[in-house]
Image: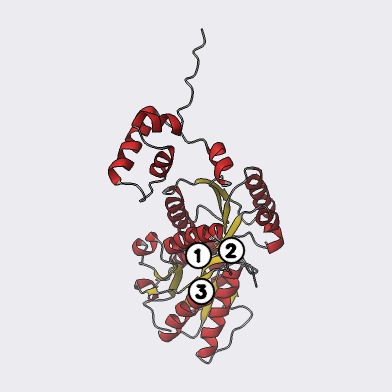
Amino acid sequence: MTQRKSPPVTQRAIAEALGVSVATVSLALRDSPLIRAETRERVQRHVREVGYVRNRAATALRTGRTRIIGVAFHDIVHPFLAEMLSATEARLSEAGEAIFVNSHDDDMARQARFIDSLLQHDADGLILSPALGTREADLEAFRAQGGAVVLIVRSIPDTTLDHVVNDDAACMRLATRHLLGLGHERVLMLGGKPGTTTADGRYRGFCEAVREAGGAVGADDWIAGFSKRLEAHAAVKALWAERSDPPTAIACFNDLVAFGAMSALADLGLEVGRDVAVVGIDDTDEAQVSFPPLTTVTNNARAIGEQAVEILRARLADPDAPPMQVSLQPEISVRRSCGAAAR
């Protein structure tokens, strides 16, 4: 004989059982400071005991909000982006939002399918590191449905959308100035995908630092097109095979590229920090324990994630507010990987 399911517990039933109003139950479930802490605890304890589960569909009908937020990155397994996702998820989940996560790998079709899924679920917001080639028009259908969009890590040139990014030009300018200040004259920028605001900004900062020091940037001074360890390893091996005067210092697009460069240099019999100086960008945990420890530029991963959530909430509260665009400033952590003076 099939056992019937018990009817779902409602907020009204909880209110009647505790002798409080439905409004009090609702506020307690949202952890609101508008009710006394003892009342809030009593409601929440009873909710756990009876196994109450919020009906999001009913909530959406009452409030006009589904409390569904999409979060999409171009490479979710990257340590820097994983740290950012952790911070974003923590800030969203503490307020009870449901989170849909996507890693599009710079595939516009995958990004479009994810946004279409958010549209089908009437999602409230999207925190997006846009795929290479994304235009504002690609996000218009989501915005037209009332969804808020905050760009994160990468932006879109001349956008009016809210965004939280690093000052990428300042990141690479800081890294390159540090290497030039050590006396290096043959400095190379390694990694980054041209066409993204991140890579283009970092190349701009590289050029500015070299020119400030009285140098000139040649066509071969940026080896671009990748952002991962294995590709960087192969690129450095090829570089040393092809050039008779390879660089004495490498300013890397990110820490993963720096780790790939350092492993290749070790294979070539070169000592990082003595024969070749290497600097990364991200300041991942691994940078502190790599061999040698990596000099790197702090990339504000947690701050970006947390600020993106705050801006998203502000946009949902006031859809007509002026664009909220934040650019965070970097700092450099100097370690042994840049210890070489120019030869």
Q: Can the viewer see residue 237?
A: no
At x 31% / y 37%, what residue is drawn? 42
| Mark 3 crowd level (few <14, some 14–19, many ≥20, 10 Å Cα) | many
Q: Are marks 1 and 2 in contact (CB under 8 Å)?
A: yes
The numbered dot on residue 167 is 3
Q: Are marks 3 and 1 in contact (CB under 8 Å)?
A: no
Residue situated in front as seen by the camera: 272 or 126: 126
Residue 108 falls in image quadrant: bottom right
At x 42% / y 31%, what residue is drawn? 52
- In the depicted structure, whether residue 111 falls above or below residue 231: above
What is the three-letter code of the residue carrying label 1? Val
Which circle's residue, 1 or 2, is located before the other in the chain? 2
- In the depicted structure, whether residue 198 falls above or below residue 310: below
The picture places residue 256, in percent across and down from the top left corner, at 48, 62
| Mark 1 crowd level (few <14, some 14–19, many ≥20, 10 Å Cα) | many
What is the three-letter code of the residue carrying label 3? Asp
- In the depicted structure, whether residue 117 falls above or below residue 107: above
At x 53% / y 46%, what residue is drawn? 67
The numbered dot on residue 226 is 2
**Which residue is denoted by mark 1 in the rendering?**
257
